[in-house]
Amino acid sequence: MFFNNSNSSKDDFDIDLNNVPQHIAIIMDGNGRWAKKRGLIRKMGHKAGADTLEKISRCAQGLGVKHLTVYAFSTENWKRSDEEVAGIMDLLRKYLDEHIKKCKNDNFKVNMIGDPSRLDEDIQEKIKTLESLTENNTGLFLHIALNYGGRDELLRATKKIAQKVESGELKSDEIDEDTISLSLDTAGVPDPELLIRTSGELRISNFLLWQLAYTEFIFSDKLWPDFDESDLKEAIFSYQNRDRRFGGRK
Ligand code: IPE
Ligand code: IPE
Ligand code: MG
């Protein structure tokens, strides 16, 4: 379903709090266009996008969502200008530092997915610090996809499985869907029930290719920095009115 948020009757979505998705995935798109519309440099759009992430994570936690997986930087985003990539990495450093400072108060459990090896070492260190400082928190699991690509994740998972077969730890005919799920970066996390993509683009851009097999999709025209709590509630409301059949019949 494609919905357009031009009708802004706010916060009147009658969400069933007993049927909130356990896991919501978001493709946070549209930061560049948001900045351009305002005559700002792209980095300012990414900065506004980081503020929106903050707001939406809090709202999701308040609604009882268990896992929020957000696409922050794809394996393809390295194709952008050096200036833009450096700007995003700079904002990422600030985001990590701020969360390291306040992580005992906001109760998120932060977990990065993607291949960290291409990120600068200081960023890799900050990620490890934040993950370990928040591992005993009890609130929302915030999974941040950084240098993440669904194909890259499947490739890395395939290599892990092949190594187990080579070493004799696993027989090839023992490989099943769980073997694959448990070899992905999202091992142990239930598949998202709901995916939201902002900015009007109708594609998944290499996000969670395995995990989205039966996910409900919501495409919003809003640019990510403009996405707000009532948009999240509207998306959940729309999800709650879907008929999920999983290939079966009622
Ligand atoms: C999403 O916003 C953030 C990243 C991909 C890092 P964009 O930067 O893609 O914004 P648009 O799509 O150009 O508006
Ligand atoms: C997807 O957005 C990646 C992130 C939001 C991090 P892009 O802006 O990179 O995707 P395309 O290029 O429009 O498919
Ligand atoms: Mg984009």
Image (cartoon, grey):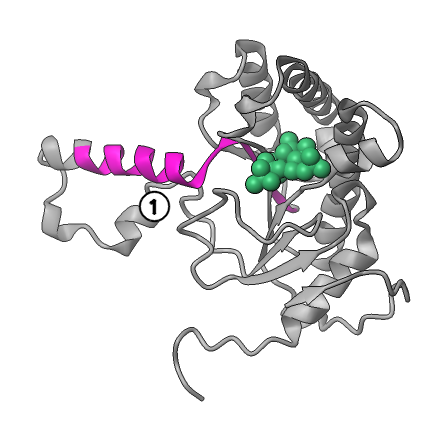
Q: Is residue 83 magenta?
A: no
Q: Residue 229: x, y in percent? A: 81, 53
- State the residue at coordinates (69%, 70%): 238
Q: Which residue is farthest top? A: 121
Vertical placement of 118 versus 147: above or below?
Answer: above
Q: Quadrant of the C terminus?
A: bottom left
Is residue 240 depicted above or below 111 in this figure? below
Going by the image, does 226 lie left or right of 70? right
Q: Which residue is mark 1?
A: 182
Please tell me in which quadrant of the rendered image residue 92 appears. Answer: top right
Q: Which residues are magenta?
A: 140-162
- Report x, y in % for residue 73: 58, 31
Q: Is residue 196 in sight in this rendering?
A: yes
Viewer-nearest residue: 95 or 43: 43
Label 1, residues with CA under 10 Å away: few <14, some 14-19, many ≥20: some
The quadrant holding residue 47 is top right
Q: Can you tell me which quadrant of the image ligand 1 is in?
A: top right
Instruction: Quarter of the image for the N terminus: give it.
Output: bottom right
